[in-house]
Amino acid sequence: MVNDVLSVAKPNKRLFEQNTSSTASANCKKSVFTCTIQVGSYEAISLRYILFEKNAITLESWNPDFRGVSMTRSSVKFKVFSQEITDCQTYKPRGIFFITTTSCVAHRISARLDISRYNKKFDPGSLATYERYIVLRLNHPSSELPTLSILNDAKELSKEEYDKLTKMTKIPKFKEQIIIDKPKSPSSRYLSAAEFHPIFSQSFSKEVTFPEDGIGAINITKSDLLCLQPGEFLNDVIIEFYLKYIHRQILNEEDRNRTFIFSSFFYNRLTQRPVSPSKDRLTCMYENVKNWTRNVNLFQKDFIVIPINERSHWYLAVLCYPYLEKAVPREIITVSDKDSNPDDESSSSKMTGRSRHTGDSSIRISKRSCILVFDSLGCPRPAVFRNLRLYLSLEWKNKNEVSRKFNSETVPGYCPKIPHQNNDCDCGLYLLQYFESFFKNPFNDYTPPIHLRKWFNLDEVSNKRYDILEVIDQIRKK
């Protein structure tokens, strides 16, 4: 079977340190970079790799139930044979394939991914179009797509057919592929680790520690640096290091004093299921993290920063002005329906105390107690809003004698309109950029919807892997 291998896509460290003695590598004609795969109504999954053979496709995705962020993440592997593919259509300009399979293989894949637990479905016989397909997006030049033998006979779709099918399958809109003939910048996937940054070719005899005073210090090993190579997912060590670096070295003293940053493990710990079914969930939630704030009063801070990792995806939550019981008004303006954001809880009239119809007047808000979620995939996070309100309520009760309500009216949840990632691996970089821009380019209008589409230049995100390596290298050399 190894001799039949045509293409291998592995968006991980083996892209940069390929084993030349590997039989599979020796027989590969081309590397194919795969971004995402959608299985029925199950949202896009990040692939560890995809292997194209003459008679089958083997895919390995990160385990959807995985909550950790270490370099040794678990994964799920499944295989689809050519005789199990009943139909295949492609739109070459964007490298997207729409694949239907037999009911048997659909059941097998659904079981492997355990998608029913998320109320999702993959069924080729479903009446709902978006539940019938495996949607595969390959990130390589369209002219080379036919070399994948198992997909050679795919029916080519016109632009109109593609748009129609995209709408019915509810896949995200992808930008046109950019063909890169040769490496042109430090961020190119085609560079080796040593070519990407000289730190990989240097001796690394001891860990890099930051901050040096030892208080909440982060220890960075050379293996942690591997996730800063292009195409890799950032791990918790790099996320926490750079958050601390921004907090200590970039923010001014005023911003440092009014900001508290939780560990990346806080939210997972908060939402951890009770070990004993007999224990009350709310009590267990708070007991899990009660001691995390024994030396700090969160209600004396303006901003509480919470990096979150769920199912190998990073996003950022910020609790703003938790001590405010009422919004601080700014000025009266006119709002319209078209400005509403369906991902905000504030889209309903109850959040503003008045209807949001065209021509209605509304008060602009300069400060208010609220929860902001910055997600580079643009996913709504109602569960995060609920869980963090519960936490604030229990924390307030523990630290104060006076009662206070924390609900969707007193602490609304907003999903600002922000720049989004256009691949499957840069979510951690966007989290760090959101945090940095939150103070670098602060906004003082908390009236929903919050528009931040041009918050920062995307080049800042593209260069951030290299920039973080530069910072670590400078600390190491001190």
Image (tube, rainbow, N blue to C red):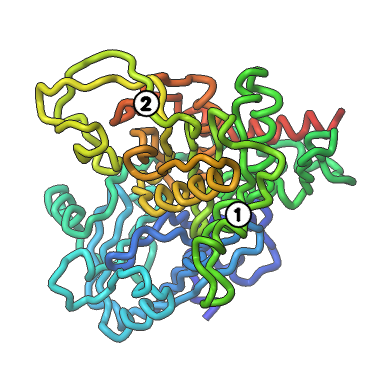
Dot 2 crowding, Cα within 10 Å, few <14, some 14–19, many 20+: some
Give the residue at mark 1.
Answer: 15
Q: Which mark is residue 297?
A: none
* Residue depicted at 30% across the width and 62% down the height: 135
User: Where's residue 33, x and y in %?
Assistant: 47, 54
Image quarter hosting the C terminus = top right
Mark nearer the N terminus (2 vs 1): 1
- Residue 325's place in the image compared with 116, above or below, is above
Looking at the image, which residue sits at the far bottom?
104
| Residue type of the residue flagged with mark 2 | Ala
Q: Give the image quarter of residue 455.
A: top left
* Residue depicted at 25% across the width and 65% down the height: 154
User: Where's residue 95, x and y in %?
Assistant: 33, 53
Q: Is residue 351 left or right of residue 312?
A: left
| Residue type of the residue flagged with mark 1 | Leu
Decide which of 381, 363 is in the foreground and name it.
363
Q: Which mark is residue 327?
A: 2
Looking at the image, which residue sits at the far right?
205
Determine the CA span between mark 2 and mark 1: 51 Å
Q: Give the image quarter of residue 202.
A: top right
- Residue 192's place in the image compared with 366, above or below, is below
At mark 2, the secondary structure is loop
* Residue depicted at 45% across the width and 25% down the height: 457
Q: Is residue 28 left or right of residue 172?
A: right
Q: Is residue 165 left or right of residue 474?
A: left
